[in-house]
Amino acid sequence: MSEPTVIERLARISALIAASGRNPDEVAIVAVTKGFGVETCREALAAGLQMLGENRVQEALSKMEEVTGGRWHLIGHLQTNKVKLAAGRFALIQTVDSAHLAEAIARHAPAQAVLVEVNIAREPQRSGVSAEDAVELVATASRLLDVQGVMGMGPAEGDPMPAFNELRRLRDEAEQRIGKPLPVLSMGMSGDFQAALAAGSTMLRLGQALFGPREPARRAPF
């Protein structure tokens, strides 16, 4: 039996979104193409997926040169020494996790759209601002950049719902703090997106659910 196509996998995901009581048109899907080639990027675009997510700046920039169209998202940690390359090149940088990084991006592209990444899993190996400091960082970053919401990853093991519910609560608190909507709640990956939907996610980051397994040496947690 042949592997399902991206269009077929996307149809299944859309059905699961609808089955969860959510409107598929109101849940954005970022196709995580990190570790896949440019043909996979083109397949995603042909299937109607306009947002492409990459972890590494250099890999993303290389693909941008070969792939026409698409709105590229940076979903991996951004080092300050790569800010000059990234700022202004991505439709959305999802991983602002410090005031220092927000300031560095603003020096190059003050209109850059970003999300504040929160370490809702409270795992030391994960990037992201602490949950305790998240609202303050949103307030600081929103004075420098176009902050559109927050992003987080569930825990590596166990029930992700408490973490996802906390991110939604932090987003709501941040909206009250800055006095404007933060429409993007980016949470949910291939292994836990149904829980994220139940918690109110408005943006899923899906790789293997759309494209199947990566090669073992190139596998990523998305």
Image (cartoon, grey):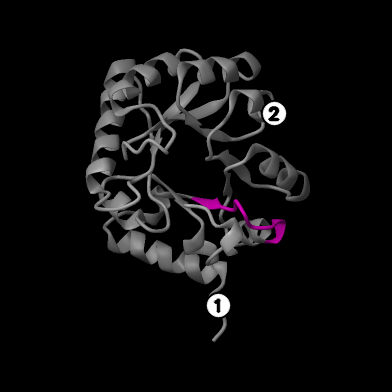
Q: Is residue 185 visible?
A: no
Q: Which residues are magenta?
A: 30-39
Rendering coords of residue 46 (x, y %):
64, 61
Tell me the amino acid under the disc marked 1. Glu
Q: Alpha carbon of mark 2 to alpha carbon of mark 1: how far?
A: 37 Å
Please name whichever residue, 56 or 28, is drawn nearer the observer in this view of the structure: 56
Q: Is 35 contained in the magenta span? A: yes
**For residue 209, side relative to residue 181 (left or right):** right
Q: Which of the 4 image quarters holds residue 181?
A: top left
Q: Quadrant of the N terminus?
A: bottom right
Q: Where residue 37 sits: x, y (%)?
A: 69, 57
Residue at 26 percent across and 24 percent down: it is 173
Residue plotted at (65% across, 24% down)? 81
Q: Secondary structure at mark 1?
A: loop
Direction from residue 166 to residue 124 in the image, left or right: right
Which numbered tag is attached to residue 85? 2
Q: Is residue 83 above or below residue 106?
A: below
